[in-house]
């Protein structure tokens, strides 16, 4: 769909009172090319009212748990409505476009052409931005035994986890908490499929005592990489791959400006739609790091970017790089 001048688009957010839905509303409310279709708060789970608004929209965002997203997708009869789903339900489904415009050269065309766009998972998108270019460049084999850990703010867990952390009067949650240790995290499939891997990484997410901000770290042994690989070689691949990307910033080797006395600032991309990529390490061992705002590029920001791409608008409209 190409936008004509002064066009306005009808947009509905199913799940408007959740964490991602509220953030999306802030983005949308500030725009004059969007007409927001609102559901009465007491009807927000009424299937008839949701179906009416879903079918009245040019673009409908689903900011719901997986099961409710599947339910919403099944309510749609209007072939012109574009669904952008923030949940995990359709991210590896063949008939949905994966909502990461930076995935590869053809991804924007896929997002433009499809009426079903699966928005990224926050951990997964940070991981894929680091790994996929190296696989495509032949520097990492698809069966490389990758591992990754991710540090995330508690807003990643939605309303329930926010309430848990913000109501923690006894300080029981002050320490960072590793989770999904049984290797069943819901983003593993998405990481494997869109990362271009033949097997998923060993993945260790950790939730911290702060609202938002996420960084994924991927350790690599230089001796196990293709001959001639170094931090600079990997950075060259990233610079080439993301050269024209408005929302990916590749930092110089061991970027000291982002280290405070040696400590990395996991909140340094907050309130932007930017992913920041870094390579740290030495001649023997490297650590690739990708940082984003889990509610920005990891959720609501990328959902807006996908809408802009789908509608043929300037991709950066309403977003901060
Ligand atoms: N938080 C994050 O950083 C990210 C979240 N996501 C994904 O986005 C989706 C939304 O997450 P998040 O905003 O964090 O979750 P929240 O729990 O904060 O919000 C979910 C919202 O969905 C509503 N809801 C639940 N069931 C239904 C239903 N049957 N019909 C209508 N509304 C319903 C809830 O209603 P009620 O108000 O009554 O609770 C709530 O407002 C999830 O799939 C999540 O995995 C993706 C990337 C990052
Ligand atoms: C802290 C926390 O629990 N975070 C969520 C990530 C939320 C997200 O990006 O992913 P989905 O869209 O797939 O929910 C988790 O790890 O499950």
Image (cartoon, helix red, strand yellow):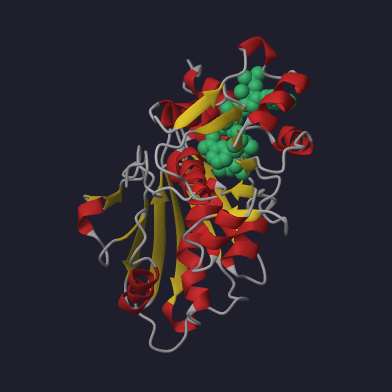
Q: Residue 112: in sight, yes or no?
A: yes
Name, please, the residue furthest toward the top. 42
**In percent of the image, x 41 and y 42: which residue is there?**
293
**Up-down relation of residue 166 to residue 261 (above or below):** above
In the foreground, 300 or 203: 300
In the foreground, 269 or 90: 90
**In percent of the image, x 52 and y 46: which residue is there?**
122
Where is residue 165 drawn, in percent x and y?
A: 50, 24
**Up-down relation of residue 211 to residue 286 (above or below):** above
Where is residue 221 drawn, in percent x and y?
A: 45, 75
Q: Residue 178: in sight, yes or no?
A: no
Figure disc tally? 0
**In percent of the image, x 62 and y 49: which residue is there?**
117
**Up-down relation of residue 166 to residue 109 (above or below):** above
Where is residue 29 drawn, in percent x and y?
A: 43, 25
Left or right: residue 126 compared with residue 247: right
Q: Quadrant of ligand 1?
A: top right
**In percent of the image, x 35 and y 73: which residue is there?**
240
């Amino acid at each position: 769909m190409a936008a004509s001048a002064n066009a306005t688009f009808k947009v509905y957010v199913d799940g408007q009172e959740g964490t991602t839905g509220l953030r999306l509303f802030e983005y949308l409310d500030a725009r004059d090319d969007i007409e927001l279709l609102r559901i009465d708060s007491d009807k927000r789970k009424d299937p008839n009212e949701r179906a009416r608004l879903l079918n009245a929209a040019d673009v409908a965002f689903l900011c719901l748990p997986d099961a409710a997203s599947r339910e919403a997708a099944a309510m749609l009869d209007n072939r012109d409505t574009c669904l952008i789903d923030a949940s995990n339900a359709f991210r590896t489904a063949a008939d949905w476009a994966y909502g990461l415009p930076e995935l590869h050269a053809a991804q924007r065309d896929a997002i433009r052409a499809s009426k079903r766009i699966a928005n990224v998972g926050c951990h997964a998108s940070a991981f894929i931005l680091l790994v996929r270019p190296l696989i495509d460049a032949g520097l990492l084999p698809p069966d490389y035994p990758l591992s990754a850990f991710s540090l995330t703010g508690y807003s990643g867990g939605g309303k329930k986890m926010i309430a848990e952390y913000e109501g923690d009067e006894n300080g029981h949650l002050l320490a960072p908490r590793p989770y999904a240790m049984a290797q069943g995290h819901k983003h593993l499939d998405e990481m494997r499929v869109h990362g271009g891997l033949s097997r998923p990484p060993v993945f260790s997410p950790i939730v911290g005592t702060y609202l938002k901000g996420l960084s994924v770290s991927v350790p690599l042994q230089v001796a196990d990489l293709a001959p001639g690989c170094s931090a600079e070689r990997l950075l060259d691949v990233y610079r080439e791959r993301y050269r024209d990307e408005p929302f990916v910033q590749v930092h110089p080797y061991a970027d000291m400006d982002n280290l405070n006395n040696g400590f990395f600032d996991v909140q340094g991309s907050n309130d932007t739609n930017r992913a920041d990529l870094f390579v740290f390490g030495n001649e023997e061992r490297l650590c690739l790091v990708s940082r984003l705002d889990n509610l920005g590029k990891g959720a609501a920001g990328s959902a807006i970017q996908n809408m802009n791409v789908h509608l043929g608008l300037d991709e950066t409209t309403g977003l901060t790089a």
